[in-house]
Amino acid sequence: SGVAARLAVAPLDVLKIRFQLQLGGAAEYTGLRQAARRIWTEEGVRGLYKGTVPSLALWAVYSGVQFPVYAEVKARADA
């Protein structure tokens, strides 16, 4: 479910980052719809999913560590 959520939100994350990067500079994007259309036409679908693989890898590592650590802490707290 985490992967599906990440894939659903990835384009919004790309848009957010693009807007953050243009602060203080010339406004390349004027609105969400305009930005999404421009990225889609200039970069295609891949443009809306840039950075998704590294974030999925980070999520996998985080989850892979979080659950065993939680189980260990819980076991020690119950003992």
Image: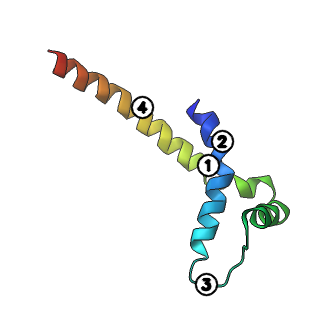
Horizontal and vertical percent for residue 18? 64, 67
Horizontal and vertical percent for residue 44? 81, 57
- Dot 4 lies on which element? helix
Q: Which residue is mark 1?
A: 52
Residue 20 in the figure: left or right of residue 39: left
Residue type indicated by callout 3: Gly
> Whole-Å distance between the Cαs marked 4 and 3?
40 Å
> Whole-Å distance between the Cαs marked 4 and 1?
18 Å
Residue 77 in the figure: left or right of residue 49: left
Q: Where, by quadrant of the figure, is residue 36 drawn?
A: bottom right
Residue 24 in the figure: left or right of residue 58: right
Assess whether mark 1 and mark 4 are in contact (beta carbons under 8 angstroms).
Answer: no
Assess whether mark 2 and mark 1 are in contact (beta carbons under 8 angstroms).
Answer: yes
N-terminal of the two: label 4 or label 1?
1
Q: Which residue is mark 2?
A: 7
**Front tag of 4 and 3:** 3
Residue at (62%, 69%) from the top-left corner?
19
Outermost residue on the top side: it is 79
